[in-house]
Structure formats: structure tokens, C-alpha cells
Image (cartoon, coloured by chain):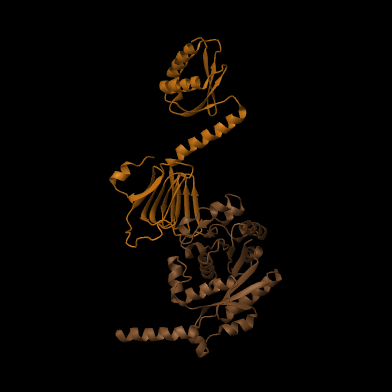
Chain colours: A brown, B orange
């Protein structure tokens, strides 16, 4: 029986889609059979971040409307044969799918896959309700900003009232240097406000921008964000993984940068 | 010519009422004569044909169809059975077929850019004055000509016309579909692809994209 995980945040632009792509890829790298579902109908992005846009023939709405079979709509990833994507429709809106239909869909996919990750749209309306309908657990993504944390708090409340008790927190786009100077909330501050367990800290890393633009998730690569996502995947599987010290690597980078500067 | 064959017309085609007593050879000769005489009346049309009054084998039916087509300019699309249900089904097919033929040779214009999430679905061929952006889609039963850049999806020959083609001034599609064949963009696009006018067409089950030159243009079939 597979596990259905919804990745949500409330606020837009904090990294739900990027996290879904990278965690999905990471779980596939660790040998799990994974399906990613983009539930952001009308504003689909996950296919672009995964670099699979050119393979879309059928989508989520076609599946729930029985225009095609699930197998026909699932796109096999170009890097990992045990990773699949069910893209969202671009020409419809959120009301094209109901929570009941999503429940049915995820329960069918459970038999096939070890993990089903749902990329949730921003907001708390129909799209959010669809995404959480079939979920067993949730990963709440937030950035260390007051507005994002406030929205995450609201989302955690809504998840609880919808009987989703297993919620974990991902603090995204953390800048260790700013935290040190006292200009940014630390991950501890965020955890204290939201009062749920932390599952990962992802540093602000320009490699993420490059990877999303190229449509190639970076989980497991040498950069900090790649390591951070790999650690999240291991923690999702239940492993105890120590948190990487963003501080140390930062000074290393500074050293490296200063050497680079002297040369020019 | 003593009434061994009577030709009747109905909406989608013609009915041949055949005399059950006449010999098959006489019938064939009479059918040939009748259609030759009426060739001008029928003109160039696509029709279905149905037989009444006499049981014929499949070979005989085919033979008669050949005789009809040899003696006048009618093209016989199908043979209808004397059964209302199949008749209705056949009639639909014929109507669709006829409509398609008309549509692929007529067209319309659309001015404006198609942005992500927008779909332009037309029955005829279409000429678009503007760009097709990623996430947008054009569906046409005929051909698609884009006087702008193509960066989204195009589906030409949507009802199965394998002769349909797509032309764009700047050809960088995510996906092109012609009839039942789908081609997708390469995963590692070469950066240096110039924006040259190109045509996408279907040949032997493969979609080809080539610069629009004289040779390619002479191969276009409408």
C-alpha cells in the first residue's frame, strides 16, 4: 500500500513545486516507485520543472473524466524509470475536479506506487481541498518570512481539521549569513511558531534556479540544496539524518569566492 | 433497358433496384448503360450505394461498384446494407467525410497571440497572425499556418487527415500532432536553431520538420 503525501504551503512562490520535483526524484533515486500529481489545474508547472512538458498527451482532468486510463496519462520520467508524473490540465480550472474524484484516483494509485506526491496549488480554496482529499500526510513548505509563516500556520490548522495529523515542516530558502546577523528568522524560530516537527532545511541556493529552469531536479547533487533534499527524502523514509551545518559550508564558499576575486 | 435496373436517389446516396429475374450479365450491362447515360446528371459527387430487390454476393457488389465508377464521375464511398441502423451509421460517416473534404480546403484567419492555457479549436484550416506561446494549443481539422512563432502545441488534421501540415515562421513547438502521430520537442534543444520558416508534415508515420523551400512546397497535397 503506497503512501500519499501532499506538499502544500498556503502562500505562493515558497517552493512547493520545486520541493515536489526534488523529493519525488530523490525517493525514486532511493529505489521507491513514485508518482507525482500536479493538482494545480490551470497553472501547471510541475511538468516544466521536471522537463517533461513535451511529453504531455493526457492529463489529470482527462483521467477523472474517464477520457483515458490512468496508465495512459502517467508520463515516465526521462531519468528514473520508477518515477512517473500525472500532469495537470492547463485549459480548465480547479472546479474541473472534486475531492471525491481525487480520493478515488489516489486510492487507485496506491496499489501501483510506494509514494504518491501531490503538488498543491497556493491558496486554501477548491484546489487545496482537492489536493488534500486523498492525503495521508503533509509536508508544509515555508520560507523564513513572516507572511509565509503566517500562511503556513493557517494551512496546518486546516490540515488538522481535515484529519491529516502527520504534518512535517520544510523551511526553504534559508540564508545562514542573514540568520547570523539577526536579519532573518532561524529554522528554530519558525519551528517554535508553527509547533510541528521539522523534516528539512533547504538553503537559498542559486543552483535551484538553474535546475528548475533546465527542467532537471538536483536532488543528490553536490550543492547544498541537492544534499538538503536528499536528506529530506531519507527522513521521509524514516531514517535519522543529521542536519547539515549550513554555516561551515558558507565560510568555505566565502573562502573560495575570495580566492576567485583575487585572481581577477 | 426494360426496367431491369432502376436508380433511386436518397439523401446520402443512390439505391439500385435490381430485377431478380434478369441474369447477372444483363444486369451488369444495363447498369453500365444507365450510369453512362446519367453521368452528366450525377456529376462529381461522393455517394453511398445500396442494393435492393436481389441478393448479391460481396464480389458482385464490388464489381457493380467498379462498373458505376468506370462509367461516370461518381465516387462510391461505401455500400449500404438494407438495414436502418447501419444505414444511419453509414450516413453519418459519409456526412463527416464530405465535410472534411470541404474543410481542409477552406480556411479562416485569427489575429492575436495565443497564451498559456488558451485553446483555438477550428473545423477548417487556420492562418494565425500572431504567436503560439508555450502552454497554448491550436487544434484544426485542416492545416495550420502561423505567421509568428510556434512555441506551444499544434494539432493539425484533427479528424485524421494525414496530409495536413503546419507552417510557422519560427518553429519551436513543444508538441506537434498530425492525424494520430505525435512528435515532441527534443529534450536538449540546440540553442543555435535559427528562426527560419519551417513546415511540419507527416510521412510514413513520422513527422518531419523541414525548411519551407520549393521542393517541399511542391509536395504539399491539399
**Relative vertical location of residue B214 with respect to residue A255 in this rendering, above or below:** above
Q: Quadrant where the N terminus of chain A lies?
A: bottom right
Q: Nearer the viewer, residue A61 or A252?
A: A252
Percent x, y of residue B143: 42, 46
For image coordinates 46% across by 41% down, the residue present is B103
* Total number of numbered discs in the rendering: 0
Q: Residue at x 47, y 71 (%)?
A: A220
Residue A255 location, quadrant:
bottom left
Could you say where residue B195 lies in the image, as x and y percent from the top left?
33, 58
**Residue B42 x, y percent position in the rendering:** 46, 24
Q: Is residue A3 visible?
A: yes
Of B34 and A28, which appears nearest the observer? A28
Identify the image quadrant of residue A14.
bottom right
Note whether residue A158 is visible. no
A203 vs B144, nearest the viewer: A203
Above or below residue A207? Residue B55 is: above
Dividing the image into 4 quarters, which one contains the C terminus of chain A? bottom left
Left or right, residue A248 beside residue A198: left
Counting from the top left corner in percent of width and height, residue A174 is at 51, 80
Looking at the image, the residue that sits furthest to the left is B214
Determine the residue positioned at 50% across, 49% down: B121
Residue at the extreme bottom? A181
Q: Is residue A132 above or below residue B5?
A: below
Amino acid at each position: 500500500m503506497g503512501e500519499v503525501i501532499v506538499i502544500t504551503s498556503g502562500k505562493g512562490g515558497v517552493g512547493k513545486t520545486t520541493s515536489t520535483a526534488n523529493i519525488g526524484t530523490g525517493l525514486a533515486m532511493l529505489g521507491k516507485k513514485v508518482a507525482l500529481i500536479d493538482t494545480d489545474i490551470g497553472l501547471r508547472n510541475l511538468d516544466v520543472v521536471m522537463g517533461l512538458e513535451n511529453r504531455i498527451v493526457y492529463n489529470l482532468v482527462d483521467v477523472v473524466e474517464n477520457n483515458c486510463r490512468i496508465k495512459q496519462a502517467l508520463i515516465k520520467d526521462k531519468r528514473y524509470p520508477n518515477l512517473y508524473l500525472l500532469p495537470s490540465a492547463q485549459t480548465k480550472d480547479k472546479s474541473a475536479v472534486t475531492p471525491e474524484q481525487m480520493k478515488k484516483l489516489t486510492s487507485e494509485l496506491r496499489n501501483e506506487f510506494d509514494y504518491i506526491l501531490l503538488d498543491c496549488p497556493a491558496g486554501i480554496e477548491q484546489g487545496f481541498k482537492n489536493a488534500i482529499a486523498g492525503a495521508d500526510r503533509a509536508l508544509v513548505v515555508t520560507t523564513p518570512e513572516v507572511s509565509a509563516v503566517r500562511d503556513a500556520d493557517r494551512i496546518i490548522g486546516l490540515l488538522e481539521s481535515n484529519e491529516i495529523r502527520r504534518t512535517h515542516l520544510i523551511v526553504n530558502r534559508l540564508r545562514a549569513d542573514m540568520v547570523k546577523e539577526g536579519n532573518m528568522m532561524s529554522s528554530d524560530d519558525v519551528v517554535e511558531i508553527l509547533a510541528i516537527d521539522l523534516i528539512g532545511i533547504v538553503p537559498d541556493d542559486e543552483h535551484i534556479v538553474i535546475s528548475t529552469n533546465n527542467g532537471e531536479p538536483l536532488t543528490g547533487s553536490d550543492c547544498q540544496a541537492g544534499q538538503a533534499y536528499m536528506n529530506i527524502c531519507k527522513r521521509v523514509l524514516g531514517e535519522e539524518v543529521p542536519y547539515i551545518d549550513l554555516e561551515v559550508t558558507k565560510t568555505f564558499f566565502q573562502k573560495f569566492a575570495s580566492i576567485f576575486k583575487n585572481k581577477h | 433497358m426494360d426496367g431491369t435496373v432502376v436508380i433511386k436517389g436518397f439523401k446520402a446516396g443512390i439505391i439500385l433496384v435490381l430485377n431478380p429475374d434478369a441474369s447477372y450479365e444483363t444486369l451488369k450491362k444495363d447498369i453500365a448503360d444507365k450510369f453512362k447515360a446519367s453521368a452528366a446528371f450525377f456529376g462529381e459527387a461522393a455517394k453511398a450505394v445500396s442494393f435492393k430487390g436481389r441478393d448479391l454476393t460481396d464480389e458482385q457488389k464490388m464489381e457493380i461498384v467498379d462498373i458505376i465508377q468506370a462509367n461516370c464521375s461518381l465516387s462510391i464511398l461505401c455500400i449500404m446494407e438494407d438495414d436502418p441502423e447501419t444505414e444511419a451509421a453509414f450516413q453519418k460517416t459519409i456526412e463527416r467525410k464530405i465535410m472534411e473534404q470541404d474543410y481542409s480546403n477552406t480556411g479562416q484567419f485569427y489575429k492575436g497571440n495565443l497564451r498559456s492555457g488558451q485553446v483555438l479549436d477550428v473545423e477548417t484550416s487556420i492562418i494565425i497572425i500572431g504567436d503560439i506561446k508555450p502552454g497554448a494549443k491550436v487544434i484544426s481539422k485542416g492545416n495550420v499556418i502561423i505567421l509568428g512563432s510556434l512555441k506551444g502545441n499544434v494539432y493539425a488534421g484533427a479528424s485524421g487527415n494525414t496530409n495536413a501540415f503546419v507552417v510557422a515562421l519560427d518553429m519551436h513547438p513543444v508538441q506537434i500532432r498530425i492525424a494520430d502521430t505525435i512528435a515532441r520537442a527534443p529534450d536538449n534543444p540546440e540553442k543555435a536553431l535559427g528562426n527560419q520558416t519551417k513546415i511540419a508534415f507527416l510521412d510514413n508515420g513520422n513527422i518531419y520538420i523541414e525548411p519551407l523551400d520549393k521542393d517541399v512546397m511542391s509536395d504539399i497535397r491539399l
